[in-house]
Every structure is written in structure tokens, then in C-alpha cells.
Amino acid sequence: MGKIRVLIAKPGLDGHDRGALVIAQALRDHGMEVIYTGLRQSPVQIVQAAIQEDVDVIGLSSLSGAHKTLFPKVMEALRESNASDIPVVGGGVIPAEDIPYLLEQGVNKIFTSGSSTEVLADYIQQLIDPESAVITPPKKIAHIGIAVNKIDDVLSFYTEMLGLELESVETVESEGVKVAFLKIGESRIELLEPLKESSPIKQFLTKKGEGVHHIALEVDNIDERLNSFKSKGLPLINNEAKQGAHDSQIAFIHPKAANGVLFEMCQHLEGSEK
């Protein structure tokens, strides 16, 4: 497979191209060929350039606030030119509430302000060569971890008031906790009771009191996922997976990566969570 060719364009009257130039250079650093069309390009001009240059991907950058008008016009011009097979990604100052609309119009993905160029490059690589994909989205929420002082003191709320069935109770030595699992649909609630002063759950309780501690996401290929996170500079609590409850491998992402939310990656052996 040859080098991926990417056209970077700024549709409309946007007069700033610093961000687009940074992205173009970052993609070149990842071994891609980049064609930059410059400022103030019309949707038709962008599509014509993409066809003439025989690019694999179009990247649209917008800071002007006109993305809801201009991005769909690019998609329309692609259809009219029988070039709808060229995927389009967008980025810039784009509010979250506008993203579903742009995706409905045919844009493959929107990268918001602050997105990593590493993530963008990886996405483009996987878009053109799906077999290169290492990371797939999490399967589901495996469980929600709730820190409690003592499981026996709170269990009746979950079993008697909410009507959930206690599935199992076990000790996780690596975390210094006793864990009670209550199944709810395809997920679980995990009650976490500290067994020693050095337990992270004990430290959490001392600082914040009882409450939601973390959200665990069920994933495949946890080791490859952690390596990918590290290559992108994502802050981690665990650089390598370790033993968790229910015969699982787990690792935590640092909460500063997710605006204060502690996420756990969790991979179960086949059949171990049933």
C-alpha cells in the first residue's frame, strides 16, 4: 500500500490557517502525503482539487462557525461529482451539539478542539486500511464501582430496595478490597470495601466519602490498548494490566485524562464474567 494522500482544506471565508498547517505537518510526520489548498476555498473547488490530486481523504478545518453550511456543501459536491467514495473528516471550533448533524450529512468523523494529531493520524490510517486497526470501541460498561465503608451496611438497599440479586463477593488482593457484584442487565454494580489503610478505596473514602468511584469499560486487547494510550501520551495509573476481580485483567486511566472521571479498562477471559 502506497502513502495515504490527504487533502487539507479550509472552506469559506476563514482567514486563519495556523491550525490547518499544524495538522498538515503532523500528518506528513506520520508518512502521509498532504495537499493543502489554502484559505477561502469553495466546496466545489475543494472537491475538484481532491479529484484532480486523487486523494484518499479530505480533511476540512473550520474556525468561522460556518461548518453546518459548508461541510454539507462539500458532501453535496462530492455526490454531484460521483466522488462520494472519498471519506471526509472535519475539525476546528465545532460545538458538540453540531456533530450529530454533520455525521448525518455524511462526514465520517469530527475532531474537536484539543484532539490529538496522533489520534487523527491513527483514524485516517484505519479509515483507509481497516485491517491496521488495533483499538476498537469498548464493548459495554462492565460495571460501575461504588466505594463504601462496609458492604454489609449498604447491601440491603441494592438487594431489597432496588431488587438486584447479589451475584458474588470476593477479595481482590491487588487493590486491597472486598468486592460485591450485583448484576443489572448486561452490566454490574460493584461495591468496593477497603480491607486495609493502604487501599486506594480507603484513600478515596477518606478524601471524598462514599459514592461512585469509577466506571469500568469492557474491552478487547487490553495490552495493545494500553500501548496505544501510552504512544498518544494519555496519562495512565497502570502502564500494564494487572489481575482484577472475576478473573479479569484491569488497568486504570488517570482521571485527569477524562476531566476527573476515573475509567477502568477491563478484559475478561472468555466466559469468566458469566
Image (cartoon, rainbow, N blue to C red):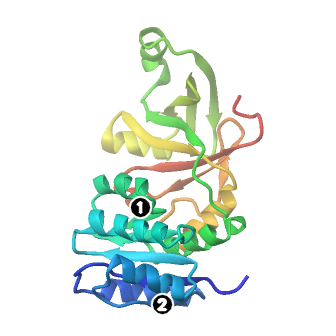
Residue lying furthest top? 160
Using the rendered view, name the quadrant where residue 40 is placed.
Answer: bottom left
Q: Which mark is residue 182?
A: none
Q: What element carries label 2?
A: strand
Residue that badge 2 annotates: 35
Alpha-carbon span between mark 2 and mark 1: 32 Å
Using the rendered view, name the quadrant where residue 245 is placed.
Answer: top right
Please state which amino acid type lies under the numbered disc 2.
Ile
Residue 151 in view, yes or no: yes
Q: Dot 1: few (<14), some (14–19), or many (≥20) neighbours within 10 Å?
A: some
Q: Is residue 269 left or right of residue 225?
A: right
Please state which amino acid type lies under the numbered disc 1.
Ala
Which residue is at the front of the view, 23 or 163? 23
Q: In the figure, 195 relative to 238: above or below?
A: above
How many labels were placed on the picture?
2
Q: What element carries label 1?
A: helix
User: What percent of the width, then of the height, locates residue 55?
Assistant: 56, 82
Q: Which mark is residue 257?
A: 1
Q: In this view, does 86 lie to the left or right of 101?
A: right
Sequence-wise, which precedes: disc 2 or disc 1? Answer: 2
The structure residue drawn at horizontal position 39% and vertical position 90%, both measured from the top left corner, is: 37
Q: Is residue 6 left or right of residue 273?
A: left
User: What percent of the width, then of the height, locates residue 180?
Assistant: 56, 26
User: What percent of the width, then of the height, locates residue 177?
Assistant: 55, 37
Q: Quadrant of the C terminus?
A: top right
